[in-house]
Image: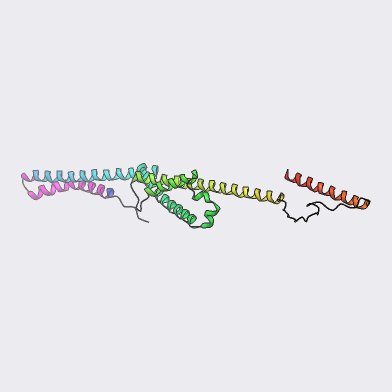
Amino acid sequence: MDRPKRSAAPWLFGIAVLLTLLAPVIFLGVWVGAGTVEGFGVALLAAIADLVAAAIAAITATVLAVRRGVTRIRTVVHGHPQGRVGRMAEHEAARWRLARRRFSELQAEYAAFEADRHAVAARPALADVTVPATARFVQALGDAEFLVTDEEPAGPRRAEFAAAVDRAVEAWENAQRVAEGLAQARREHAGVRDDTRAVDPAPPRVHHTVAPGAPATGERPAAPSGSEYAQAADAVRRAAARGARDLRDRLRA
């Protein structure tokens, strides 16, 4: 962690006070050292120069102290030494780094889907640009790829890239939902068709070769009319055949 820089304002204030206190001493020292009346003017100029230096040090220290105070107030109020502008710039920089990472993850996920034959077969609509949701995703992905850069760009382009990544991620999620819904509908439709075939199987067709003089297919030789037992058996068979046809008709209905 970097240590905060110390301000030079306290040192400058100390120098200003010291020079102010030394002004009389400098005046007397120069005057006494000259030992003449003309030395009074020289001593006065030396004292004035000392006071001017003290004033410059005091003014500089005041400016530094005010700037440091403003920086502290900005840090407390806005959370950044440069105030709201600095905080927004820092936020945009962090947002760009996050968008760059999300875009890389999106590219990797889409590339993995295209390389997986089973995934494409399970959700073919996600690879079909004629599906509106997939077309919107491809367009959003292209917009983000146009704005991506290796280094962090300036403010406007940085914000545009972050917004483009947000749209691409949202379009990808929507395209996945649509593709999954279409795949689920296709599976349900296939299941209903299989169930229909299981409930109503097509009756097998049996081809018989009918010999000359033999009874037609489905007809049984008539029992002797003189046998009551044979007549009853034939009636039972006909009733069973009618019942089977009625049952099949009900199943078809």
- x then y, percent, for residue 13: 26, 47
138 left or right, relative to 210:
left
Q: Colour scheme of this structure image?
A: rainbow
Q: Is residue 29 magenta?
A: yes
**Image quarter hosting the N terminus:** bottom left
The answer to whether residue 170 of the structure is visible from this angle is no
Decide which of 200, 64 is in the foreground and name it: 200
Give the image location of residue 179, x and y in percent.
54, 48
**Which residue is at the front of the view, 23 or 229?**
229
The residue that appears at 84% across and 48% down in the rendered structure is 238
Residue pictured at 10% horizontal, 49% vertical: 32
Residue at 45% in and 54% down? 105
Residue depicted at x 50% and y 49%? 126
Q: Position of residue 47 (x, y in %)?
A: 15, 45
Front-lying residue, 16 or 109:
109
Which image quadrant is residue 206 in?
A: bottom right
Tell me: 62 left or right of 230.
left
Any part of residue 190 in sight: yes
Q: Nearer the viewer, residue 163 or 64?
A: 163
Q: Is residue 231 left or right of residue 28?
A: right
Residue interval drawn in magenta:
11-39
Residue 36 x/y as whole percent: 5, 46
Instruction: Residue at the far front: name it.
Output: 212
